[in-house]
Structures are given as structure tokens and as C-alpha cells.
Image: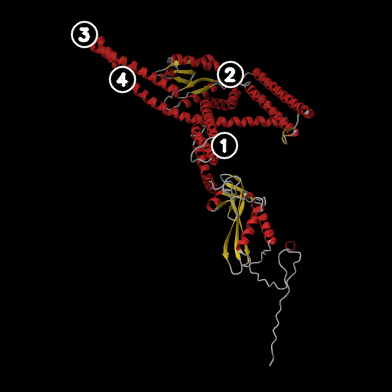
Amino acid sequence: MTAQTKFFLIILTFISVFPALAQTDSLSKRQDSLNLAVLRDYELKIKDLAIQRANDSIKRIELEAKLSSMGTADRTKEKELQKQLEEITYRQQHQESRKKAKIDSLRQNTKGYPVIGMLMDTLFYIHAKTGAFTPLERAQNISRKIHLLYNNDFLRVDSIITIKSENTVDIVYGETIVMSITETDALWNNLTMDELANQNCLLIRTAIQQAKIENGFTKLLTRIGLVVLVLLILWFLIWTVGKVNIRLIAFVQKQKDRWFKSLSYRDYTFLTADQELQIVLFLLKIVHWLIIAMILYIAFPLVFSIFAFTRGWADSLVQLVWTPFKSMFISIWKYLPNLFSILAIYFVMKYFVRLVRYIFTEIDAEKLKISGFHADWAMPTYSIIKFLLYAFMFVLIFPYLPGSDSNIFKGVSVFLGILFSLGSSSAIANMVAGLVITYMRPFKIGDRIKLGEISGDVVEKTLLVTRLRTVKNEEITIPNSAILSGNTTNFSTYTKTEGLIIHTQVTIGYDIPWKEMHAALIDAALMTEMVLHEPAPFVLQTSLDDFYVSYQLNAYTREANKQAAVYSQLHQNIQDVCNSRGIEIMSPHYRGVRDGNSSTVPATFLAKDYNSPRFKVDIHSVEIK
């Protein structure tokens, strides 16, 4: 580590300390304002009690004078005066009890302000105000006067004494009143005014004497030497840690071929050897800087504690680092009951979802049958119920989440909800359509269907889309909302039970008898491999047009997914049968002149002695007159 880096770390530490001190000062001012409001109310009550006590004292003197001048003859008058004296004594005792009770209540909520000595140590605290001076102003004023006494080269510590005045006990040095002890100050400390004055006077004397010794020239040189020694040790430790880290890195790199192997499972490699090496080097770097941070954290308080005026900095630095961790640990400890509640809710819901899944799996496998509930509804219904159960679980867990009652958490939740609702309207429409399609059951996985102009096999159904594979192995993705708004033709619904009827149309001239044509088409259908013999194929004559008759051949098959192959083979067989029977499949608007033209039937289906007919020409002679 270079000297610039060390200097930067030191400056960074001081920068982090000073904002905390500034924040503490602002908090102190706010706390002082709160204390003043409480103490102002107390001072008003004390004034009322003081007036009452003065009146009672005057009244006591008058009553005692009357009693002393009264003879022994008037016993009734004497008893009356004695009773009044007892009432005054009781009232004064009650007032003292009230003041002590008030002080006890204030002691729990009111902050005291420290009187700071020359070594930046706290000598004692000031809680009560005096006249126009607040507790904070009194503490600052007393601290300033103590520092003035310390800076007096001719100071005689024994001359700091206590003097009792009319309502206070003062700590003085010559003509300087260092502080005045009031009755309220004594009550705050559960002492008499004299006891508190003597105690504080001794503390001030001791603090000044100790500061004189601590700030002596010999002590100063010793402390400077200690600071230099600590800094040298700090530099040596950081240098040693750096050297050890460099050697450790070199050792790891040297052993990388022995220690690191690629982490893989089957054909997938999670981490290569080089990636593992980089992770280890990164961890070593983190450990290196953590050790340096720990050394600095220990060294800085040690350096600050050498000089008396910087000892407060050491405490601030320790508290600055420790307070966040302490608050974090305390928060975690307090959150443990909520965490256990969350875990209990989670595990109960987890095993309940497993039970629901088991039930719907049995329905899906058709082991458990419920009247009116189809097996293919089972898993989609399970997905819906699982979502609702987990949503309910989140509702139960939400109050236990840290910060769930904060305005920021609520604001973010509302923002995400609005964002989701505005940006996912089409997605929600597709999800709703997916649910409707699931319970409409227009098709299932593997069915051959037709959506508009698209035909194919269903390969996937989701809440958002349905995917089809066409006969050309094209995958087509269709939004569920488009499916719900259009017509769906399912070729596979009755295929396994009644069979799918495939049909094709042939147009034949009127010269072929319809019975012969029916027989030819039915024979062609029965010759097709994937056509069923039962139910038997049948022919419908759909129209009688000007030049031809339209014959529709209908045949049953159970191979709805192989319609292209069935139609292709069926058409081949129709051609073969018609050719073998001498039936010409002509263009619908063909008008054939057979004279001199060969048949359109392929030569392989014609007789061997077949000859093309000759042209028939009729010549009519015309007489010319």
C-alpha cells in the first residue's frame, strides 16, 4: 500500500466522523429544545411553590411568636395555633415530596448536559436551568470558566472553594464564580446543596491538576513517541499483509493446474478452471482489504487515545463503526419472532399445496373421478388454485415483512401495481382467454385443429398462447385472445370413436352411369390404407350441372393427423380405378369430339388392339342450276 493510499484512508475516516458529529450536534439542539419546554413548566411550578413556602415561613414565624407570648391559661387557643403550625409543616413536607417526584419523572425523560474538562472528559452533568440560562448554556459557561482557570499560570487549586449565599452554594476562585448550586441541582443528584457543591468543587480541582500533569512537556514527548511507534507498527503490519497476500496469490497461481478442475455436469460446464482461479483471487483480495480495514479500525482509536484531547474522537470512531452493526444485530434479533411466523406460514402452505397437487394429479391420471369434472381440467385448475394459495400466503406474510408499514413501501407497491395494470392489459386478456379455453375444451395437446386459415397439431397450451405445428413442420404461435374470438375446427375429437370423415369431389360426364361411378369411387376408397371399411365409404351426388355430375366421396379414418397422406393416396386410387374401368376424368367444360382422337385413358389401361377412331366426314353433293 502506497503512502497516498494510507493518507486517503485516514482522510476518509475523518470525513465520515465529522458528519456524524454534526448530526449529533443538531440532534442535541432539538433535544435541548424539548428539555427547555419540560424544564420551563417545572420552573413555573417551582416559583409557585417558592411563593407558597415564603408565605408559610412568614406564617410560621407569626404563629411561633404568638405561641411564645401566650400563657398557659388559654389551652384552646394554643391547640389551634399548634394545629396551624402542623399544617404548615405538613404542607412544606408535601411540597418537598412533590418536587422530588417531579425530579424523578424529569430524570427519565430530560437530558443532562456535560461539563467538559481540559482532557475532553465529562466532569458532571447539568440538568436544571437557572434564571435565564438553559442547562446547555450553564454547562458551556461552567466548562469555559474551568478552562480559563486552567490557563491561569498563577492558579492555586486549593483556592477553589465553596461559599454559601442566600439561596445557592457557589464554587468560586477569588472573584470568579465558577458555578452556583441551586436547590433544584441538589434534588437532581439526590444530595444536599452543600454535598453537591463540595463534590463538584473536588471534581474541578482534580480535573485541573490532572490536566496540568497530562499536558506537561515530558508527557507530550512521550505521547508523540507513542504515536510514532503506533504508526510504525501500523505501517509494518500493512506491509506484511501486502507481502503475504502477494506470495499467497503467486502460490495459488502456481498450483492452479493441481487444485482447479472444470466444474461440469454432463455436457454443461458451470465453471472452468480459469473462472475458479479468478473467484479465488477475488476472495483473497477481499480478505486482504478486510484485514487492512480491521488493522486501521484498531489502530485509529489507539492513536486517538494517546492524547487526551483526541480521546473523544476515538470513542466517536468506535461508536460510528459499531453503532450500525449493533443496530443491525438488534433489529435482526427483534425480527426473529416475525421471521419464525413467516417460516411457519410458508411451510404450512407448502405442504398444503402438495396435498392439493396430489389430489389433482390423481384426477389427471383418471384414478379419481369426479362427476362433471374432466381429467384434462385437473392440472390447469391446480395451477389456478396454487396461484391463489400462494397469493393468500403472501397476504398473510405481508404484515410480518420489515418496513411493510412504511410509506415508502406502500408507495412502491402502489407504483408497481399501476405499472402492471397499465402495461399488461393485452397479456391479462390472453390469460383470461387461456382460462376460458381451458374450460371450454375445444382442443387438447396432440389434436389436429384449424384456426382460420391455419391447420396444424397442437404442441403446447399456455395461459398466454397456443402453439401449432403444421404439416410442413412450421411452428405457429397464436395468442389465446385470437383463438377465443374466432372459430376452431377440431379434426381429432371424434376420430377415436366414430372416425373422421374425409371427402373429395369428382366431376364426371353424363355418359358414365352413376351406379358404375359410385362403385368405382367406393372401391378406390377401400383400396386406401388408412380408410376404415366399417363404417363403409359412401358417395353423395352433390349437383347435376350442365356438362357433368358432381360426385362427393366420403370415407372414414382414424388418422386425423395424417390427412395429407390419406388424401394423396385416395386421389391416386381414384385415378387408377377410373382408368382401369375406362372412365375418363375430364375437365368440367370439355366437349370432346371423338372422331379421329385417342382416348385420354392411359395406354396401359387400354386394350392391346385399341385403335384411334377415324374421322367421319359426310359429303353432300349440291346441284348447280
Q: How far apart in space, not on screen, are marks 3 and 2 (Cα)?
A: 67 Å
**Which amino acid lies under the numbered mark 1 shown in the image of this protein?**
Ala
Q: Which residue is mark 2?
A: 211
Q: Which residue is mark 4?
A: 55
- Residue 142 visible, this angle: no
**Which amino acid lies under the numbered mark 4 shown in the image of this protein?**
Asn
The outermost residue toward the front is 609
Mark positioned earlier in the residue sequence (3 or 2): 3
Q: Which residue is mark 3?
A: 75
Foreground mark, 1 or 2?
Answer: 1
Image quarter of residue 134: top left
**Which amino acid lies under the numbered mark 2 shown in the image of this protein?**
Ala
Residue 260, x across and y down, in percent: 76, 29
Q: How far apart in space, not on screen, are marks 2 and 4 (Cα)?
A: 48 Å
589 w.r.t. 9: above or below: below
Mark positioned earlier in the residue sequence (2 or 4): 4
563 w.r.t. 511: above or below: above
Mark positioned earlier in the residue sequence (1 or 2): 2
Q: Which residue is mark 1?
A: 365
Mark positioned earlier in the residue sequence (4 or 3): 4
